[in-house]
Amino acid sequence: MQLALASPLFRSLAVGTALLAASVGGFIAHKSHHKRHHLVLHTYSQRGAVYLTAWRHGPVVAPFEGEELVPLTFTTVAEVNDGCRWEGTETLTPIEGHKFAYRYDEKILSCEPGADPYVKTPRIGTVTISP
């Protein structure tokens, strides 16, 4: 039987589990002036779902150089109680003004022998910028 990665059991474990690795791509530090913006995620969540997301604690604060938006990628890796190691990847693509198209995908990196992996829960949406 396959359970969704969105299961309530996973919610409890994922919230309490320390992430093994988290990385943010798309930022390059320069000695110029950076503006810090709050990135606000607008998407649906499957009932009971917990996603390996940079937004797990609310808006993400990100520095931007200049006014032009650049593509961003957020990657989170965690051991999940289904016996597998998962990677959640969030891709932000500039679409207009202060808005990004958002895509979330998951993949299994490895599983213990006999593991019963959860079902993947991809999603799409938008991300807006607030000062």
Image: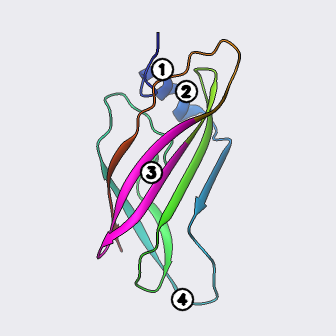
Q: Residue at x 32, y 38 (%)?
A: 45
Span colored in magenta: 88-107
Q: What separation in Å lies between label 1 and label 3 (alpha carbons)?
A: 20 Å
Q: Is residue 93 magenta?
A: yes
Verify whether residue 24 appears in magenta: no
Question: In front: 61, or 120?
Answer: 120
Q: Quadrant of residue 8?
A: top left
Q: CA distance from mark 2 to mark 4?
A: 40 Å
Give the mark, 3 or 2, whose residue is nearer the N terminus: 2
Amino acid type, label 4: His
Residue visible at 62% across and 55% down in the picture:
23
Label 1 residue SS: helix
Circle 3: residue type = Trp
Give the labeled residue for mark 4. Answer: 33
* 3D distance between C-alphas at marks 3 and 2: 17 Å
Q: Is residue 80 left or right of residue 11?
A: right
Residue type at mark 1: give it. Answer: Leu
| Percent coordinates x, y for residue 129 in the rendering | 35, 69
Query: What residue did someone put label 1 on?
Result: 9
Q: Work out whether 32 lies above or below 14.
A: below
Mark 3 crowdedness (10 Å alpha carbons): few <14, some 14-19, many ≥20: some
What label sits on residue 55 in the rendered view?
A: 3
Give the Cα separation between the discs numbered 2 and 1. 7 Å
**In the rendered view, would you say 95 is above or below 29?**
above
Dot 2 corresponds to which residue? 13
